[in-house]
Amino acid sequence: MPLIGNKGGRGGEIIHGDLGLKAPPIIQEKLIDGEEFGAALTLELLPEYAGDYIFTSNWGWDDGNPDVVYGSKLWESLPAVKNNQVYFIDAKGSYFNDPISLEAQLEFIVESFLGK
């Protein structure tokens, strides 16, 4: 499954850059401060990367079936999932980091945090 840090849209620039929210240490090290654009990881590594809040979309993980992740016991065990702090961002609207896309991402992220 792909993971993106601050680079290339998908809300990372807003969450960790503009809003200044802390990323899990491994994401900060590898994807924000590091040179990597993205990282591929297995489902078993997800707890290492998962934060208190998760913004996600189905990008065709493994066989394209979102239940591979979202239906797994590992997913269900994540604190963000247990605390209803998972937000499904539209893949089409979060892919880019142009001004229009970033504005839409910001609106979605802020509304998600405020519970609207």
Image (cartoon, rainbow, N blue to C red):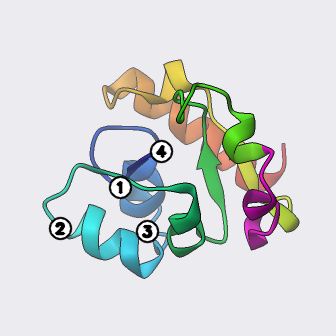
* Magenta-colored segment: predominant secondary structure: helix
- The residue sitting at 60% across, 31% down in the picture is 58
For label 3, the SS is loop
Decide: is 70 above or below 51.
above
* Badge 2 or badge 4: first in the primary sequence: 4
Question: Are there few (<14), some (14-19), or many (20+) residues within 10 Å of tag 4?
Answer: some
Q: Earlier in the sequence, mark 3 or mark 1?
A: 1
Q: Which residue matches tag 4?
A: 1
Q: Earlier in the sequence, mark 4 or mark 3?
A: 4
Q: Mark 3 or mark 1, which is nearer to you?
A: 1
Q: Secondary structure at mark 2?
A: loop
Relative side of 75 to 96, left or right: right
Q: Residues within 10 Å of mark 3 (few under 14, many from 20)?
A: few
Q: Which mark is residue 5?
A: 1
Picture coordinates of residue 70 (x, y %)?
Answer: 75, 45
Q: Is residue 79 magenta?
A: yes
Question: Residue 92, percent across and down?
Answer: 51, 18
Q: Is residue 61 visible?
A: yes
Question: How many angstroms separate mark 2 from mark 3 (CA)?
Answer: 17 Å
Amino acid identity at mark 1: Gly
Magenta-tinted stretch? 71-80
- Is residue 28 on the magenta stretch? no
Q: Amino acid at mark 2?
A: Gly
Residue 46, located in which quarter of the rendered image? bottom right
